[in-house]
Amino acid sequence: MATKTRVIIDTDPGVDDITAILLALASPEIEILAFIITFGNTDIDHAYDNIRKLFQALTIHFEKHPDQRARFPGYTLVSEANSKGFTDQVPFLAKGEQRPLDGEMYTAKYFHGRDGLSDVSTRHPELNIQNSSAWSNFSNGPDPRLPYRPTQIHGPQLTLNLLKQHPSENITYIAMGPLTSLAKACEMDRDLVRTRIGRVLVMGGAVDVPGNTSPVAEFNWFADPFAVHNLLIAAISEATLTAEDDGSSGKREDITGLLPLEKFLMFPLDITKEHALPFDAYKKLVDPGFADAPSQEKDKSWLVHFTSSYLERVKEVMAQYNSKNAMELHDILPVWYAITHPWPPAKHQSHAPPPFAKSRLSNGWKVTARRFEIERTGSLTRGMLIVDRRSFTSSQSKGHNRAYEQTKTDLAEAPDPVGAQSASDAKKLAASTGSTAANEHPGDEGGVLCATGTPGDDVLVKLLFERIWGIDT
């Protein structure tokens, strides 16, 4: 049997996160080491409750339909794991960061509801945690009735612990929400994360398309643009400036920032918005009574009742937006990629290519390098990815500001103590970003790798129906 891909899932459980987690639990290709809950779609406490509601729904479902347990290999009770001697295969559940690194905190309750899960807490109170003693944290270890291991360890510290415990470059980190917890882990031990993490798969950003929170920003990166900047951009510019100032020409791997960009793959709105779960297909194949009236468990299985209960409000919200009659599958794409791209490579492979080299991509998947800056403080443009779309006929690099360049030239021709300081400031403003993103990918040399192609929306939807709801289409 092939080795499973070990993953840490960093999530702010809203409606697409929960669907992505269901897919992950139903996928034998991956082993979930931990869920790290963060703020984002809602506040961290509601987000934490949402994943507990998911596991409770699965537990009730399997009690009524034990024959369907086999479809969810990622679901294992602590008691079952104890009896077989592999408790470490039951995922941890930890709280990560509660607010962004800097600036105001915002949520996406406008779409996901006040509780982050389509307001099921008030619309469908039967889905709330029914026995708090059985679904809470336990100071003496995880309750044997739980399908996860709650821990008081802070999420970023748990990430560092797991990276230490597992072989180097073995773990895939999947981020479905703001990148705050990952940025915090890097702040705590940058070298450990850089050297021991295997891949980082992130849903976030809008490169060439409008935003979904503001006209220019995707929500996850709007929620904490400072984390994005620190992970992907800040250290790159700083190291580049230092090399220019002292005349050195360091190795390119020394200027890649807090994260090695060759290990980082983003799934921006450009590609995620092209994938959606059609509500008509869901009604036809899964729940014939979907959205005709509030879901009732007596008419269907508990799992279908759970998914219909949060999808019914999504349908309402999408109609209000005059948008497609479907739920866009943003957070599902990085999980899908992890399923279809095993990691780490087979042991017999020596001198293996980087994680996202063309030779590693399965049929239909495409990756392109893109260069951008992220706006952090703009009142209208927070979270916007600034892409240089100008045509170039000179040797000037992308991202340069001609006015800054002229200021540098003027100050260099007539230096003075004040001017020298101004020149330094101007140089910092004019610095362009760069990294070791694989040059074999088309796009902007030295940019952040972005998924730009998949096997297709129909392939993903078929996978969801088969694995989550057990329907062969």
Image (cartoon, rainbow, N blue to C red):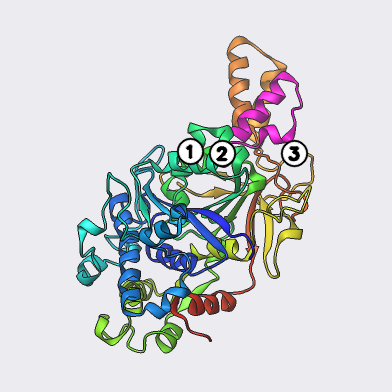
Residue marked by disc 1: 185
Say whether residue 218 is visible. no
- Label 2: which residue? 193
* Side of 236 where 357 appears, left or right: right
What is the secondary structure assignment of the residue under circle 1? helix
- For the record, the magenta segment spans 232-257
Magenta segment, prevailing SS (helix, strand or loop): helix
Give the quarter of the image for residue 324: bottom left
Q: Quadrant of residue 206?
A: bottom right
Disc 2 marks which amino acid? Val
Q: What is the x, y in percent for residue 81?
A: 42, 59
- Please, what secondary structure does the residue beneath circle 3 have? loop
Q: Amino acid at mark 3?
A: Gln
For label 2, the SS is helix
How many other residues sit within 10 Å of disc 3, few (<14), some (14-19) or many (≥20)? Answer: few
**The stretch drawn in magenta includes residue 236:** yes
- Residue 372 percent across, percent down from the top left: 61, 46
Tag count in the figure? 3
Relative side of 130 to 393, left or right: left
State the separation of the CA atoms marked 2 and 3.
34 Å
10 Å neighbourhood of mark 1: few (<14), some, or many (≥20)?
many
* Whether label 2 touches label 1, CB < 8 Å: yes
**391 lies above or below 195:** below
Q: Is residue 379 found inside the magenta-colored segment of the image?
A: no
Tell me the residue at 42%/74% (across/down): 69
Q: Is residue 53 left or right of residue 390?
A: left
Instruction: Choose between 102 and 70: the one closer to the eye.
Output: 70
Of labels 2 and 1, earlier in sequence is 1
Q: Which mark, residue 396?
A: 3
| Residue at screen point 70% across, 46% down | 437
Q: Quadrant of the N terminus?
A: bottom right
Relative to residue 431, is residue 210 depicted above or below? Answer: below
